[in-house]
Image: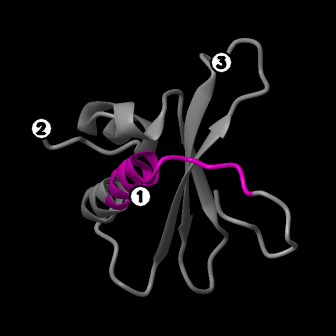
C-alpha cells in the first residue's frame, strides 16, 4: 500500500483500472477531435463522474471542449467512459459518428 503526500494511506485502485480509464479517456479525446474537426490549440478534457440525478444510470462521461478565446462547451454521455460508443459520442456532440 502506498502512502499519500500527507502520510495517510492512499486508497488503492488497481493499476489495470487506471490504465483502462486513461486509455478510454484518450480514445474519446481523439474521437472528439475528429468529430468536431478540432486542431491542437483546442483543449479537450474527458472525465467520468457519478451522476447525482436519480434519473441517471450511475456514471456519466463529461467532455469539455476549450477553444482559446471562446466559452467552454460541455457535453455529457449517460454512460461510463469505457462504454461510450462512437454513435453515442456523435449523438452527444451533435455530430455524425462516421461509423
First-in-chain label (2 vs 1): 1
Camera-nearest label, 1 or 3: 1
| Left or right of 50, for residue 5 | right
Residue under circle 3? 56
Alpha-carbon span between mark 3 and mark 2: 26 Å
Alpha-carbon span between mark 1 and mark 3: 23 Å
Residue at the far top: name it.
55
Q: Which residues are magenta?
A: 10-26
Residue appearing at x 38%, y 55% in the figure: 19
Q: Is residue 22 magenta?
A: yes
Q: Position of residue 75 (x, y in %)?
A: 55, 46
Alpha-carbon span between mark 2 and mark 1: 23 Å
Residue under circle 1? 22
Q: Main secondary structure of the magenta part?
A: helix
Residue under circle 2? 99
Residue appearing at x 76%, y 68% in the figure: 4
Along the line of sight, the residue nearer the viewer: 31 or 70? 31
Q: Position of residue 18 (x, y in %)?
A: 46, 53
Residue at the far left: name it.
99
Q: In terms of image quadrants, where is residue 93?
A: top left
Q: Is residue 97 above or below residue 39?
A: above
Residue at the far front: name it.
1
Q: Are marks 1 and 3 in contact (CB under 8 Å)?
A: no
> Badge 1: few (under 14), some or many (20 or more) residues near its Cα, within 10 Å?
some
Q: Is residue 70 magenta?
A: no
Amino acid at each position: 500500500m502506498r502512502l499519500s503526500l500527507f502520510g495517510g494511506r492512499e486508497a488503492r485502485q488497481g493499476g489495470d483500472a487506471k490504465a483502462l480509464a486513461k486509455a478510454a479517456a484518450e480514445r474519446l479525446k481523439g474521437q472528439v477531435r475528429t468529430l468536431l474537426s478540432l486542431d491542437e490549440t483546442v483543449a479537450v478534457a474527458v472525465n467520468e463522474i457519478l451522476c447525482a440525478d436519480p434519473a441517471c444510470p450511475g456514471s456519466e462521461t463529461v467532455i469539455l471542449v476549450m477553444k482559446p478565446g471562446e466559452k467552454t462547451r460541455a457535453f455529457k454521455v449517460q454512460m461510463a467512459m469505457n462504454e461510450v460508443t462512437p454513435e453515442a459520442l456523435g449523438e452527444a456532440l451533435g455530430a455524425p459518428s462516421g461509423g
